[in-house]
Amino acid sequence: MTEDLSGNRLIGAPNSQFNLYGRYTIPTEIGDFVLRGDFTYTGNRYYDERELVELSSEGATVNLDARFAWTSKDDAIEVALWAKNLTDEVNIIDVVEVGLFGYQNVWYNTPRTYGLSVGYRF
């Protein structure tokens, strides 16, 4: 049996996606302070070639990351506070259908994470 899937999107390909990135640097006598934000919008996508909504669709998702860092005047030391997935949304990253066994493996994004990074360049 053949099936006409013309017009369907590639598996996992969103109908739209855009990214917005902002960075603001404050130079001082002790080094630079940098505030950065990343925003990503991803439209709905299907993880099944037939685009069966009840089987494997994911609605639009957003992701917001932020970072505040200080870099020494000589660029040798950097200290940064950062956070990823500030909205703490749970999103599907990938789906693999194991049709032979009748189930799907589903992978999700990392939940909200935050931390402190310290670096030294030599």
Image: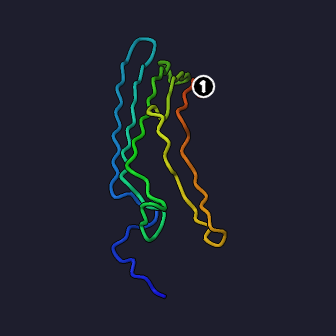
In this view of the protein, which residue sits in the foreground, 60 or 42? 60
Q: What is the number of callouts on the image?
A: 1
Q: In this view, does 114 lie above or below 72?
A: below
Q: Return the residue at label 1.
A: 120
In the rendering, at what x and y percent does residue 27 appear?
Answer: 37, 18
The residue furthest top is 29
Residue 7 is situated, as x and y percent measured from the top left of the image, at: 33, 73
Residue 10 in the figure: left or right of residue 110:
left
**Farthest-out residue, bottom:** 1
81 over 41 or under it: above or below: above
Q: How crowded is mark 1: few (under 14 residues within 10 Å), some or many (20 or more)?
A: few
Q: Residue 96 location in percent, x, y?
A: 58, 62
What residue appears at the point 54 percent right and 27 percent down from the top-left corner?
114
Residue type (three-letter) at the residue carrying disc 1? Tyr
* SS for callout 1: strand
In front of the other: 56 or 112: 56
Pick the quarter of the image with the C terminus: top right
Q: Position of residue 35 (x, y in %)?
A: 40, 25
Q: Which residue lies at the image location 42% right of the left edge and 20% below the top edge?
A: 32
* Between 33 and 57, the one nearer to me in the picture: 57
The residue positioned 35% from the left and 37% from the top of the image is: 21
Q: Which residue is drawn at 50% across and 27% down?
A: 82
Viewer-closest of 10 and 48: 48
Figure coloring: rainbow
Q: Which residue lies furthest to the right in this view?
A: 101
